[in-house]
Amino acid sequence: MIRRVCWAIAVVAAVSPPIDSFLDLSMSRHMLLQMPLLVGLGYAAGLVWPIPRLRLASLGLSAIFFAMGSLMFWMLPRSLDTAVTTAWADQAMHINMLAAGWSLAIGLPRLPFHTKMAFGVYGLAMVLTAGVVYATAVVPVCSRYSVQQQNAAGALMLWIGATLFVVLLGRGAFLLAAIAPRARANH
Amino acid sequence: MVCDDPGRKLKSLVRRLVPPLLVVAVWVGVLSWWTSGFSAFTTYSHTLRAAGPLPRPAPSFHIRDQFGVLRDTTDFSGRHILLQFSYLSCGDVCPLSMADFHMTHLALENLMPDELVLLTVSFDPARDTTERLTNMWGLHGRPTGWYLAALTAPLDDGIQADLQSLGVWVSRQDENLFNHSAQSFLLDPEGRVIEVFEGPGNSGRMVAAVEERLL
């Protein structure tokens, strides 16, 4: 019960006007703090409320595709602009990001390791590509943020991408080290 | 054995594939609609796309040029016009766009001002006074046929609507900052937009487009 109340308070706080306005002010905060925060809260919802055991084929894959599509949509420059300028789009983004996090909580545990890694590599490529675009653009790509803010957000995305790369590589290496002796023994 | 039945295998495969493919199809549809068929990912490109196909009539704007003369952009009708919007305090894209016009002027000087006019219009009439416009014109070597002008009124809904019908998106962010599209437009003597050059670094394309029509 306490965890659920904490979750509700966290969601209300994250989308409340003063915090929402503060996060919308800079591109880095909007894209790299608010969106991951809402996705994290959506994921947490999947942990706080037990997810019903749905007997649907490929539910995990569908849930992951939904989350990837949501993230891709709201990372588009036009979507970022619209979320900052239009109240209904901002609220739609909040709900969509929470739903994306929740669908990750449904999807990820159902997927085998190699599929998770494939999506991880895809996410990494998405972050790095967007990072390069935003870090190097000399013209504003998002109409609501300055070129300087754009470049700063791009540089941060490159750092996040580099960290993600190390994490993915580490997990892959760890798994290989764990299964290789067993595979040799079976052979 | 059940798993050897090809009919059941196919049914199982379809049951597994349809839900994720349906999700992907919905997202492809949404993204395609939102980006006008994967061609307009930014507010700028969406505004340009929404302005309609070329050629299209260009709206007219009331301007004050570097000589202090009040004009209308239609005053230049009968000649080809290369038109761009900027403001002199801009720290990023405007100097690059103006450098394009500088290079274009050097290449097409012999056509100006009788057959071609370059027109740079500022969004910022309060700060871009006649004196500042003249100074900037001087910095570029006082080129004949290149008019540096400012809108005669600050941005309002009417001007914004006209700019959007041309394909230009602009928004005042604060006292000193405008975020705006960085296209240049080639207008024919009838005042129709016949070509759009997106972003800076297009002087070569501008020269080629004008030469194709005038030489």
Image (cartoon, rainbow, N blue to C red):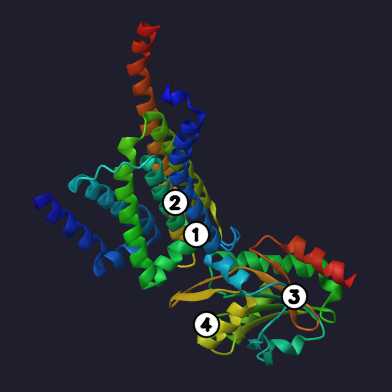
Q: Nearer the viewer, mark 4 or mark 1?
A: 1
Identify the residue under disc 4. Answer: B127
Please tell me which residue lies in front, B190 or B80.
B190
Disc 3 and disc 2 in contact, CB within 8 angstroms? no
Identify the residue under disc 2. Answer: A69
Q: Chain of mark 2?
A: A
- Residue B133: give its label: none
Residue B92 is situated, as x and y percent measured from the top left of the image, at 55, 64
Q: CA distance from mark 1 to mark 3?
A: 29 Å
Can residue A75 be seen here?
yes
Q: Amino acid at mark 2?
A: Gly
Q: Amino acid at mark 3?
A: Pro
- Residue B55: give its label: 3
Residue B67 is situated, as x and y percent measured from the top left of the image, at 68, 88
Disc 1 and disc 2 in contact, CB within 8 angstroms? yes
Element assignment for label 4: loop
- Residue B30: give its label: 1
Q: Which badge, 1 or 3, comes first in the chain's sequence?
A: 1
Element assignment for label 1: helix
Q: Nearer the viewer, mark 3 or mark 4?
A: 3
Q: CA distance from mark 4 to mark 1?
A: 42 Å
| Quadrant in the picture for residue B158 | bottom right
Q: Residue furthest left?
A: A2
Residue B105 horizontal side relative to residue B18, left or right: right
Question: In this rendering, do the residues under marks 4 and 1 share a single chain?
Answer: yes
Q: Chain of mark 4?
A: B
Q: Amino acid at mark 4?
A: Arg
Q: Residue at x 46, y 58 (%)?
A: A150
